[in-house]
Amino acid sequence: MLKNYLRIAVRNLAKYKLISFINLFGLTVGLTCCLLILSFILHETSYDRYNSKADRTWRVTRSFNNPDGVVSLHLGTVAPPFGPLLRNDFPDIQKMTRLLEIEHATPMRYEDKIFNEQNIFFADTNFVDIFDITFLEGNPNTALTDPNSILLTPDVARKYFGDADPMNKVVRMDNQINFKVTGIYKPFPSAAHLHPKLLLSFSTLNDSTIYGERGLRTNWGNNSFFTYILLPKDYPVQSMVAQFPAFLDRHMPTDGAPPGYKPHQGTKLFLQPLTSIHLRSHLDSEAEENGDASRVTIFGAIALFILLIACINYMNLSTARSSLRAREIGIRKVSGAVRQEIIFQFLSESILFSYIALILAAVLTWVTLPALDSVTGLTLSVNTLLQPVILIPLLLTPLLVGILSGLYPALFLSSFQPSKVLKGLFKAGSGSISFRKVLVVTQFAISIVLLISTAIVFQQLHFMQNTSLGFDKDLIVTMNYNAGLDKTYESFRSRLLQDPHIREITRSSRIPSGRLLDEQGAATQSGDSLRPVTADIKYLTVDHDFLSTFGIPIAAGRDYSRLYATDTTGFILNSAATKALGIRDPTEMIGRNFSYGGTKGKVIGITKDFNFESLHQSIVPLILTLPAPSQAASNSFAKMSVKLVGNKDNITEALNRLGSAWKSYLPEVPFEYTFLDEKFDQLYTSEQRQGTLFTVFSGIAIFIACLGLLGLSAFSISQRIKEIGIRKVLGASTGGLIRLLSVDFLKLVALAALIAFPIAWYAMHNWLRDFAYRISIQWWIFGIAGLLAALVALATISFQALKAALANPVNSLRSE
């Protein structure tokens, strides 16, 4: 019997070619989108699960609170003493390891080869006891034990040593420290929250010229250390977290704090599951840019929506062609077929459709996955779909899709009464027509929601990329500042400023587009004394040329000047800082006594507010300081910025001159640079990718919806051929007929728009809340999206309507 069902199903595929093609094509595209998005979701949710101990590994994080208890900063890193002290105080901790990332590109030399390397980490000896690292060469138990040991990935080793054996060879870091290669390890999987290219032994930091053993024990202010602990399986983590306040009070110093102050009042420790870091951790000082759980949910919903639209096409077209198969069903019933057998027949057809679509979708997925990689910036693989835990449900999906899309048509078609069908009295009931209308409305409502969402995403992205930041980011080249310039910087600067293509040069601890994370205690004049302020004020260490290089305007007072030696104890605040201090008129702050980080001086200037960080963040109170004269520049500055002048040709020449000067003063350091405007664009990479994916999938959704509308309108119009012929004979115009045949479908699109508008507004209103600076949702976006959907639907319907309206009425009325 099953063989007979399949034979009939294949015959119907061939008999109703247009409807079969639309159904098959729609399901194939829908399933392809699902498979592509599923591969993305599986990749995003698999982060760090390659670790055999992932479910028992936790990262220690730290927050800082204002005096009123509000969290001002939450870091994914902590101070170096925390790790050993936690291991000592909590015996349930089985292992503890720390990582310290070198945040800037660092020159590494082997013989005459020099490379600027990033993703360099100092790693504890037992790092390999918590994280699964595959060693290709070297002993995992001892590779990170000795000071000045280094582990490399194969790509890095090949770059340095070619085909020679890298073991025990010596490379020199920053022209200061030699490291011996003690191991080669396989690169971390793409689904890892960090990807170290070079691992340095943590014991190297005991050298006082690098960090110092005392600093590792007592430095509570340098919160730069990733710290991980390994706990027993199913350990009650919250019971340990509950003891952290007492732990902080027991170990952290309170020097200089007011009487009765407890360390836990100003800071807190947390434990974060390793497997939640990528999707659910949006802390400061992350090792890499993380994903977003809400984005995974959004694209999962889009995949289901697209598949639902394809299923709706099947239901619509199957019920619409009911009159074409009515006689077949009547004959089968008269021949003794019961309703259950007919239901099974139609379900077998839809399931067969689904399995054919899945096979085609698998091929399309394999072909189009590289394109998705280029959009997402990820490395996705079809192999993720071949895991038994995924493959088995995947192979059952067509069964579910087939039942979902075929159940209603099967129930509807099997309900025909053979006596009426065989006498020619059968007429599709109004109930099926109403249900088809509901399905069409659902399709276009989903499509319009996606269209509106796409428009708003791109509008917000355009706003972020083009809104004024309060300073000039164009034609600014940024580089890492190197200690080799400490003694020759003024000579280097003078040489560059002699070039007419270079306007200005400056140094700073951070540059715009970075995060403002550094904060020290502030005090301002109150009466005859300095009193601590409750405001959380971040700081930047800059030189005299910072404001002029970036074109940051002064609101009151003046800029730093080399003419005033006392400026080393002078402070420049932004307007947000004066407001945080309760002062509305910036001029009131000029000349006021001020203290920051223990340095006392006076406020000499107030800048207008500018967006140092991305537009995801609000402008924070900020203070600019000059480094102390006795302090080495390399201890104060991490970045150098050069303002160029001119057009594209001049920029090329300026970069050549800049590179030439760099090589003259820093022959051991490769010349590498980045344009500041490009760094700001990179801040919105995830939004750009999201917008692109929204566009693609919105287009696919509305295309599938229109494909179904094409088939439905073709069938509907074919049922009205005689009516159209009569109207033409009575004088109806072609335009009037097109209007008549289109208006019913356009009403459905209009209803879909009314349903979609509030849903889209609610969804995008919540999405925009993630941005400190955002657009207002404009009403005309909804109008354009609805109009676009209507125009696309009209174009789809008009094709069939025009064809029917131009047909010779004699042909349709010949039998009358």
Image (cartoon, rainbow, N blue to C red):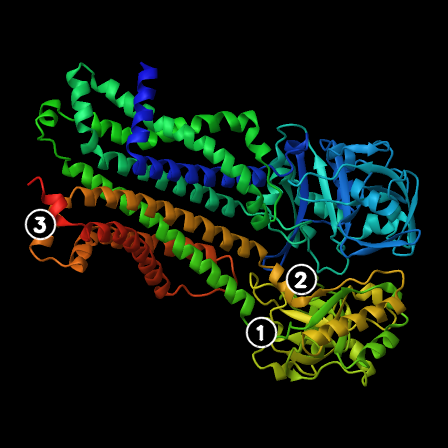
Spatial distance from mark 3 to mark 2, Cα to Cα? 73 Å
Q: Which amino acid type is marked by label 2? A: Gly
Q: Which residue is mark 1?
A: 579
Spatial distance from mark 1 to mark 3, Cα to Cα? 78 Å
Badge 3 element: helix
Q: Which amino acid type is marked by label 1? A: Lys
Left or right: residue 691 versus residue 209 is: left
- The residue shown at (78%, 34%) is 128
| Comes first in the chain, label 1 or label 2 | 2
Q: Which amino acid type is marked by label 3? A: Ile
Frontmost of labels 1 and 2 is: 2
| Up-down relation of residue 741 to residue 384 (above or below) | below
Q: Which class describes the residues within 10 Å of circle 2: few (<14), some (14-19), or many (20+)?
A: few
Residue 157: mark: none
Query: Nearest the camera: 587 or 506?
Result: 506
Residue 514: mark: 2
Query: Nearest the camera: 563 or 256?
Result: 563
Badge 2 element: loop
| Comes first in the chain, label 3 or label 2 | 2
In this orientation, does residue 496 appear? Answer: yes
Q: Which class describes the residues within 10 Å of circle 3: few (<14), some (14-19), or many (20+)?
A: some
Residue 726: mark: 3
| Comes first in the chain, label 1 or label 3 | 1
- x%, y% of residue 394? 48, 29
Badge 1 element: helix
- The residue shown at (11%, 57%) is 732
Query: Nearest the camera: 439 or 805?
Result: 805
| Up-down relation of residue 63 to residue 646 (above or below) | above
